[in-house]
Image (cartoon, rainbow, N blue to C red):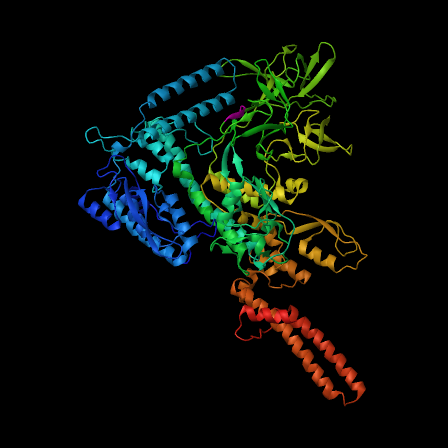
């Protein structure tokens, strides 16, 4: 245990105190107002102990004292700090090093902070010191948790005073929505969305007011001292146990619950556990909680299977050389969602190798040259320079033949040093991704299935800067709001030098708050939209004419059972007879002068908002299409989601991605499908897509789309991304989607692990031109195989070309070159029969095959042995040649004829021997010297 201080999954310490220890350290490092002895000047640690024992000061008194510090030469000196006696006790446990000053513990320590301190101690002072330090703070934490006497009492759960008021307000709001629904102003779906939105907001407000009540600092009227802080708040805030969500259930309101199907029940649980639940609330509550328990039992198996598939696909990926010298790179930038930075650029590039010079924009000097492994100080320097995006090396772009090179992989996360040759990075990646899988599954019921809705409906600026519109078409409606009419529009925020700080996609129908070029500050609302419906908006004024909107065929009056109000909804119409009716429900806008100005096609399910022949103004809503109702994002959607991404499955409701940039044209309609075409700008062939009529099309006729934009909403098909955009965007998509699932659970995994797996999924190419090789068009081969065949060609011959193919992890494991590894994975009979029929050879390059035949695996120290074996066989060959020359000199006296024969035979044998020892991995190893890697290196260098 003392050897494994950092986690291989994310490079953070695994040895971090938990629960009581954290609570004790948190209590120890608190600072309170008006404690006895405030402002005392104490000389050193001895005086502090004395004052504590005498009761002149408490652990939390603000004092000024001298703390022993170490300078760079290792000499101790005293330095003054404003601190508390408790923090000085903590300071005693720190190792003596000038790199770890007292400042690291001179603050309120939560679990996260303690982890950071351990991290710092490890980086600066090494393993032994860290283990001793961890031991010391463990003892200190337990001791002070016991001395603090923190308890968990019913009066610590303080119910928010304004809870009833908030709940009543929300009830009125819900009544109002109910009334709107009865009057037919909104649909059942919209009402459901709005009600759930209102209740989840109410729950948050209650929770916030309760949290403010709990964490408020109160003073004793008689003594003027600060009252003891709420113990439940301490437990949650320190990270010892519990979370805000759980405190909310104890003393706020339990909130919305989900049915086992994942839908959210409209009526929330208004009581909390302290007040007690009514019978109905109790029933709904158990309903949601039982789902969590059932899930847990079922998902453990799935998680284990995922890990097994991951290990199998990536097992033969090891570090084979220091630098492959590739020119390719991935671009990294911070991940921003809904105005908050989820992962900063610094976090993502730490421990990676730069693929371009980092230039200081102000001076134009190179701050960090290309090919540098970034450590913590360098990352801080890059963030200080304000770099927004930079290119780094990644296992995905590595050009090493049978593995990955050290430069592309970067830092070995478990050691914090550059990765060693022979490290089995594939298995580490697979285990890092698979291991939290069990946690993911078990985490469902932590919040009792309480539903959390996350639907983004506005955009706030993450930074200060100037707004710059890109491809945004805006019009003003009657109320003077700016409505977005473009579908691929973006708002960029740029700084004074014109560097872009952030880019946000703005959806169709959003209201933008500013004009182009407006200077905004951080946190300003830039745009907002309705997350639940998608409008169809007029671009100009005029008169609306319905076309092909025929009552009873494409238009139905749906009378709501509850309200008795009719709404006109577009429905799908299938021609009953053989009559060639081609109905395409649409609205046209007629201008007084020029006639038809615009056509708007309506998808089935659209609710009309205007009458036939009505006069409309620019920016009015003609119809609304409801988006899918909000399902709870629960990790049950999580594990299958990770598996789905790694298996590269085509999603059920796959989005259709534009393969070229150009204008949209609508073609002829068929029975159940309609044609969408894209006319490329350069005037090439129109690219056509067939789309089911039931799908909502995200573009209107004449819209300009960029390559890679969605024509139809949904989750994109990864194969399409690869074909349309290339390897880098595909990797970015997979990494961000998989990280999203883990992030919701608060699990950190380094991007490079996911990239390593994706690299293994992209090993094959499909031949598109065979050239002068024996390869066939459409055949799938390893990229390495294709390159090897191409290299054997003469100069004038045409080379084979291929396009990368994405295989799911199961498929990639079964397609691996080693049949032993594939057979031990799945479908053994099939794999072995095929291998036998093709007469395959297994070269035993990966780890799994070697484990199965019982040899030393080619990773770790075994990688060195492998090199020794190669060195030995080449030395054998050299010795044989020498031997032969000697013999020839001796035989030279004999007859010339027989000499020629012997020579021919000898050459034949040498060829056979070379072939034998060269490719026979089971040939005996001739140990050389003491058998270190260095020896092997020398032999390799001699030749």
Where does residue 927 sit, x and y in percent of width and height?
A: 56, 75
**Pick the front one: 527 or 402:** 527
Is residue 899 shown left or right of residue 50?
Answer: right
When the figure is inspected, residue 615 is found, relative to residue 639, above or below; the finding is: above
Query: Which quadrant would residue 473 be assigned to in this image?
Result: top right
Which one is in front, 107 or 320? 107
Tell me the residue at 71%/49% (across/down).
802
Q: Is residue 520 magenta?
A: no
- Up-down relation of residue 327 to residue 857 (above or below): above
Determine which quarter of the picture holds residue 487.
top right
Q: In the image, is 211 to the left or to the right of 221?
A: right
Q: Residue furthest left?
A: 54
Q: Quadrant of the C terminus?
A: bottom right
Residue 173, image x, y percentages: 42, 18
Residue at left 54%, top 28%? 628
Residue stretch in magenta = 524-530
Residue 304 in view (yes/no): no
Decide if residue 709 is in sight here.
Answer: yes
In this orientation, which residue lies closer to the viewer: 802 or 346? 346
Q: How many marks?
A: 0
Does the magenta portion include 525? yes
From the top left corner, tell me how far across and down residue 100 is, in percent: 39, 50
- Is 527 situated above or below 391? above
Residue 729 at x, y = what percent? 62, 41
Quadrant showing the N terminus? bottom left
Direction bottom: furthest residue: 893
């Amino acid at each position: 245990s003392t050897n494994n201080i950092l986690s291989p999954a994310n490079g953070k310490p695994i040895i971090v105190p938990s629960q009581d220890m954290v609570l004790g350290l948190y209590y120890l490092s608190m600072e309170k107002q008006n404690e006895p002895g405030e402002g005392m000047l104490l000389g050193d640690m001895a005086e502090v102990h004395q004052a504590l024992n005498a009761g002149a000061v408490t652990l939390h008194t603000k004092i000024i004292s001298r703390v022993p510090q170490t300078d760079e030469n290792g000499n101790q000196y005293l330095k003054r700090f404003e601190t508390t006696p408790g923090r000085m006790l903590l300071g005693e446990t720190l190792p003596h090093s000038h790199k770890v000053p007292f400042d690291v513990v001179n603050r309120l320590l939560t679990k996260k902070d303690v982890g950071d301190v351990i991290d710092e101690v490890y980086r600066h002072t090494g393993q032994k010191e860290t283990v001793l330090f961890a031991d010391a703070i463990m003892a200190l934490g337990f001791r002070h948790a016991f001395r603090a006497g923190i308890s968990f009492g019913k009066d610590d759960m303080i119910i928010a005073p304004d809870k009833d008021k908030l709940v009543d307000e929300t009830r009125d709001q819900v009544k109002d929505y109910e009334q709107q629904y009865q009057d037919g102003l909104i649909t059942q779906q919209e009402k459901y969305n709005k009600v759930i939105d209102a209740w989840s907001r109410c729950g948050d407000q209650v929770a916030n007011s309760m949290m403010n009540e709990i964490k408020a600092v109160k003073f004793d009227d008689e003594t003027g001292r600060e009252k003891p802080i709420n113990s439940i708040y301490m437990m949650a805030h320190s990270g010892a146990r519990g979370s805000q969500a759980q405190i909310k259930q104890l003393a706020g309101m339990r909130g919305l619950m989900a049915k086992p199907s994942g839908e959210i029940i409209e009526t929330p649980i208004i009581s909390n556990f302290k007040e007690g639940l009514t019978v109905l609330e109790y029933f709904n509550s158990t309903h949601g909680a039982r789902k969590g328990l059932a899930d847990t039992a079922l998902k453990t198996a799935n998680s284990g299977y995922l890990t097994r598939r991951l290990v199998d696909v990536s097992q033969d990926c090891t570090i084979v050389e220091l630098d492959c010298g590739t020119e390719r790179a991935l671009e990294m930038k911070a991940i921003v969602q809904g105005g908050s930075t989820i992962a900063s650029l610094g976090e993502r590039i730490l421990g990676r190798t730069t693929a371009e010079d980092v230039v200081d924009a102000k001076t134009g000097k190179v701050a960090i040259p290309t090919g540098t492994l970034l450590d913590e100080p360098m990352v801080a320097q890059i963030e200080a320079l304000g770099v927004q995006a930079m290119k780094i090396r990644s296992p995905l772009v590595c050009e090493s033949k049978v593995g990955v090179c050290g430069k592309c992989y970067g830092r070995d996360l478990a050691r914090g040093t550059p990765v060693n040759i022979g490290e089995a990075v594939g298995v580490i990646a697979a285990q890092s991704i698979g291991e939290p899988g069990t946690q993911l599954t078990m985490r469902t019921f932590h919040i009792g299935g309480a539903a959390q809705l996350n639907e983004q409906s506005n955009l706030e600026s993450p930074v200060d800067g100037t707004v710059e519109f890109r491809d945004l078409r805006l019009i003003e409606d009657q109320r003077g709001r700016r409505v977005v009419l473009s579908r691929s529009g973006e708002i960029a925020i740029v700084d004074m030098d014109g560097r872009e700080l952030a880019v946000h996609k703005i959806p169709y129908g959003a209201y933008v708050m500013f004009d182009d070029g407006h200077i905004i500050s951080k946190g300003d609302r830039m745009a907002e939209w309705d997350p639940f419906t998608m409008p169809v908006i007029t671009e100009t004024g005029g008169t609306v004419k319905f076309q092909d909107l025929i009552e009873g065929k494409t238009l139905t009056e749906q009378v709501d059972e509850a309200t008795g109000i009719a709404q006109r909804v577009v429905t799908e119409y299938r021609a009953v007879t053989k009559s060639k009716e081609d109905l395409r429900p649409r609205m046209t806008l007629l201008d007084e002068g020029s006639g038809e100005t615009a056509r708007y096609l309506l998808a089935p399910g659209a609710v009309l908002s205007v009458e036939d022949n009505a006069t409309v103004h620019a920016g009015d809503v003609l119809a609304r299409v409801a988006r899918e109702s909000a399902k709870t994002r629960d990790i049950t959607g999580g594990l299958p989601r990770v598996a789905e991404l790694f298996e590269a499955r085509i999603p059920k409701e796959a989005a259709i991605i534009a393969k070229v940039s150009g204008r949209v044209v609508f073609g002829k309609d068929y029975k159940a499908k309609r044609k969408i075409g894209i006319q490329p700008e350069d005037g090439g062939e129109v690219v056509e897509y067939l789309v089911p009529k039931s799908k909502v099309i995200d573009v209107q006729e004449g819209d300009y789309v960029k390559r890679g934009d969605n024509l139809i909403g949904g989750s994109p098909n990864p194969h399409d991304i690869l074909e349309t955009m290339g390897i880098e965007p595909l990797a970015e998509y997979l990494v961000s989607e998989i990280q999203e699932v883990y992030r919701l659970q608060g699990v950190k995994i380094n991007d490079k692990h996911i990239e390593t797996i994706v690299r293994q999924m992209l090993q094959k190419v499909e031949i598109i031109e065979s050239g002068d090789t024996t390869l066939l068009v459409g055949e799938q081969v390893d990229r390495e195989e294709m390159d090897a065949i191409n290299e054997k060609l003469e100069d004038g011959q045409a080379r084979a070309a291929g396009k990368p193919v994405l295989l799911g992890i199961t498929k990639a494991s079964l397609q691996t070159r080693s049949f032993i590894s594939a057979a031990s994975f799945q479908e053994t009979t099939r794999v072995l029969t095929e291998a036998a029929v093709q007469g395959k050879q297994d070269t035993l390059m990966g780890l799994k095959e070697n484990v199965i035949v019982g040899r030393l695996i080619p990773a770790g120290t075994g990688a060195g042995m492998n090199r020794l074996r190669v060195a030995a066989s080449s030395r054998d060959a050299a010795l044989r040649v020498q031997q032969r020359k000697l013999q020839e000199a001796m035989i030279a006296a004999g007859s010339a004829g027989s000499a020629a024969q012997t020579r021919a035979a000898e050459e034949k044998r040498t060829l056979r021997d070379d072939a034998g020892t060269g490719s026979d991995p089971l040939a005996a190893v001739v140990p050389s010297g003491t058998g270190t890697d260095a020896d092997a290196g020398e032999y390799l260098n001699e030749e």
